[in-house]
Amino acid sequence: MNRTGGLIVRRTLLGLLLIAALVLVIGPLLWSLSTSLKPTNEILSAPPLLIPDTVTGDHYARLVREGVGVNFWNSMINAISTVVVALIVGTAAGYALSRYRFTGSKPMLLLFVAAMTIPAYSLLLPTQVLFDGMGLLNTAATLPILYSAHAIPLVVWVTKTQFDALPIELEQAAAVDGYSRWESVRKIVLPGAKPALIAGAAYAFLVAWNDYITAATMTSSPQLRTLPVALIFYQGFSGREWGPLMAGVVIATIPPVVLFIVFRRYLIGGFLSGAIKG
C-alpha cells in the first residue's frame, strides 16, 4: 500500500472512530428527548421508535404540576452559590500562592492538589455528623458549603497556573502608573486569567448541578430537594415512569449544554493551561 493509500485508511478509521464516539455521546440524549415526547403507550412499543408517531408534552406538564420547577431552581441556586464562593475563595488563594512567597506556600498548594484526589463521598458520614452538631444539616446552606469545598481546590490550581503565566511586570508597571493592588488585579490580572476563571466556574457549576448522593444524604426536606433527587422518585417500586423521568433528564441536560456552547473556547483553554503547566 502506498503512502497515499495508507493516509486514506488512517483518516477513514479516524472518521469512523469519531462517528462512533459521537453516537455514544449523542445517542442517549436523542433517545431521552424522543422518549420524553412520546405518549405513554408508545414508550415501550416493540419495535421501539426513535421518532414518535405522536408528539406530546404531557410528561413535561406533569413535571411542572408536581413541582419539579422548584427542584430545578434549588439546583440552580446551589450551583450559582457554589460558583460565586468557589471563584472568590479559589481565585484569592490562587493569586496569593502565585504572587507571594511565604512559609508553607508550597505545602499548602500540595494540600489543595491532594484534596482533589480524595473521593468526596468517602467523607459524607463524618461530614454529616459534623454538620448535625453545628446545626447546618438539612439547611439551605448545607449543599453550597459542601460543593464549594469540593470545587475550591481545582479553582485554586487552574487560577494559580494562569496567574503564573501572567508577567508580574504588568502589575509593577500598573503600580508605577498609580494603580492600587486591587485596581491592577481587577483591570489587568483577572481579564488575563479569564479562561481559567471560566473553566473553574464551569467545574464548580457541574459539581453542584450533577450531584445526587450528597444532596440525598445531607438534606431531607422536600423544600430543599434538588432536581437529581426529585427525578429518582420517578423510578418507582412498581416500575419506572419513563416519560416524566426522561423529560426530567432533558431538562437537567440543558444548563450544562448551554454552558459548554457559550464558553467552550474558554473552557478548553482554561483546563488545558492547567494541565500543561502542571
Image (tube, helix red, strand yellow):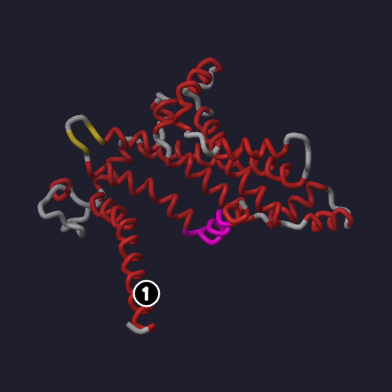
In the displayed structure, 95 sits above or below 212; it is: below
Q: Foreground: 179 or 118?
A: 118
Which portion, as a residue range, is magenta? 261-272
The picture places residue 63, in percent across and down from the top left corner, at 31, 40
Left of 103 or right of it: where is 25? left
The picture places residue 66, in percent across and down from the top left corner, at 31, 35
Residue drawn at x 56%, y 57% is 272
Magenta stretch: includes residue 255: no
In the displayed structure, 164 sits above or below 1; it is: above
Q: In which quarter of the image is residue 83?
A: top right
Left of 66 or right of it: where is 255? right
Quarter of the picture containing the N terminus is: bottom left
The three-letter code of the residue at mark 1 reads Arg
Left of 37 or right of it: where is 222? right
The picture places residue 169, in percent across and down from the top left corner, at 81, 57
Q: Foreground: 49 or 278?
A: 278
Is label 1 in a helix, a strand or a loop?
A: helix
The picture places residue 148, in percent across and down from the top left corner, at 56, 36
Magenta stretch: includes residue 270: yes
Q: Foreground: 188 or 23?
A: 23
Residue drawn at x 25%, y 35% is 235
Q: Main secondary structure of the magenta part?
A: helix
- The residue at the far top in this view is 133
Q: Around disc 1, counting alpha carbons within 10 Å, would you say few (fewer than 14), some (14 to 19), or many (20 or more)?
A: few
Residue receiving disc 1: 11
Q: Foreground: 234 or 89?
A: 89
Residue drawn at x 36%, y 73% is 10
- The residue at the far front in this view is 1
Left of 159 or right of it: where is 230? left
